[in-house]
Image (tube, coloured by chain):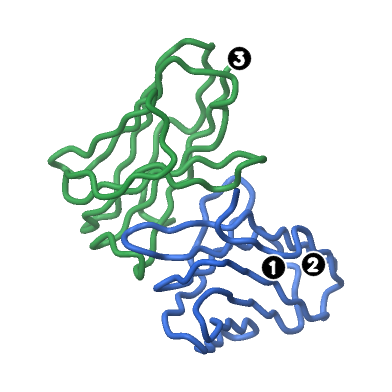
Chain colours: A blue, B green
């Protein structure tokens, strides 16, 4: 059982479209991280959010941490084929990170 | 390149055998994490070490053990291997081992148990 639920599990869109990935939990986390993983490689950190209600922007990516620090979303504007990958959210508590199962995003050219 | 190295890259072995996976953290990082990634379970935290001491434990089986050496490299030992242990095993490192920090992941070791 995943502590963090990610939705959707799979997402396939056309280049130029927008997409949103959700990460939900019944637990409160002290921090929430988003990683992207490409096939055959380890996950790479995209962002860390620590304050409830926090919004962070990274070029075309917008990350939001819920007010209660239980959920988060990742929004990509004008997706490009280079955005293709497995997007993982991870909740931090104590010294541990609990990962969601991931959302596989495919952006078609 | 994350700066974290893992060896071997691939490992094929038989049920009942024992293997050792090795990880060298990024220069300056004191904390090492081990994760198991399989298709049905996703990325599962196994164990964390900080400066040679065990700091946190996740879903690590009793057949598995790990340690971090004085030079900060770490080894994950998997024994009495079963078919279900086939997975990608990742090592990650961070500076101080808190959940706020960036964890830098290695390229992983792909283990296949036949």
Instruction: Identify the secondary structure beneath mark 2.
Output: strand
The C terminus of chain B lies in which quarter of the figure?
Answer: top right
Q: Are marks 1 and 2 in contact (CB under 8 Å)?
A: yes
Towards the viewer: B103 or A91: A91
Quadrant of the rendered structure where residue A23 is? bottom right
Label 1: which secondary element: helix
Rounded to the nearest whole Å, what is the CA distance between mark 1 and mark 3?
Answer: 35 Å
Residue at 61% across / 84% down in the picture?
A62
The residue that disc 3 covers is: B114
The image quadrant where one finds the N terminus of chain B is: bottom left
Of badges 1 and 3, the one in the foreground is 3
The residue to which callout 1 is attached is A82
Which of the 4 quarters of the picture holds residue B112?
top right
The dot on residue B80 is none
User: From the viewer's perspective, is residue A27 above or below residue A86?
Assistant: below
Mark 3 crowdedness (10 Å alpha carbons): few <14, some 14-19, many ≥20: few
Q: Which chain is mark 3 on?
A: B
Front residue of this view, candidates B87 and B27? B87
Per the model, the C-alpha gap separating discs 1 and 2 is: 8 Å
Q: Distance between the residues labelled 3 and 2?
A: 35 Å
Q: In the image, what residue occupies the spot 32% across and 29% down? A: B65
Pinpoint residue A47: horizontal percent, then vertical percent: 49, 75
Which chain is disc 1 placed on?
A: A
Q: Which of B48 and B23 is in front in this view?
A: B48
Mark positioned earlier in the residue sequence (1 or 2)? 1
Q: Where is residue B95 in the image (x, y as percent from the top left)?
A: 25, 62
Q: Is mark 3 on a helix, strand or loop?
A: loop
In the image, residue A107 lies at what x, y percent? 79, 67
């Amino acid at each position: 059982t995943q502590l963090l639920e990610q939705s959707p599990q799979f997402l396939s869109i056309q280049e130029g479209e927008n997409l949103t990935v959700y990460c939900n939990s019944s637990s409160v986390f002290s921090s929430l991280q988003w990683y992207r993983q490409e096939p055959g490689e380890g996950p790479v950190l995209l962002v860390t959010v620590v304050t409830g209600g926090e919004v962070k922007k990274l070029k075309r990516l917008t990350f939001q941490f819920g007010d209660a620090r239980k959920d988060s979303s990742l929004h990509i504007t004008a997706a490009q084929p280079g955005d293709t990958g497995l997007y993982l959210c991870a909740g931090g508590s104590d010294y541990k990170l609990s990962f969601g199962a991931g959302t596989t995003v495919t952006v078609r050219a | 390149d994350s700066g974290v190295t893992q060896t071997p890259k691939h490992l094929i072995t038989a049920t009942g055998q024992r293997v050792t996976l090795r990880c060298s953290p990024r220069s300056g990082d004191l904390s090492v994490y081990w994760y198991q990634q399989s298709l049905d379970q996703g990325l599962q935290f196994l164990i964390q070490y900080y400066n040679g001491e065990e700091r946190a434990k996740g879903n690590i089986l009793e057949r598995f053990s790990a340690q971090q050496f004085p030079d900060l490299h770490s080894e994950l030992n998997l024994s009495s291997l079963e078919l279900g242990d086939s997975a990608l095993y990742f090592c990650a490192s961070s500076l101080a081992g808190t959940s706020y920090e960036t964890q830098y992941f290695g390229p992983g070791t792909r283990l296949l148990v036949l």
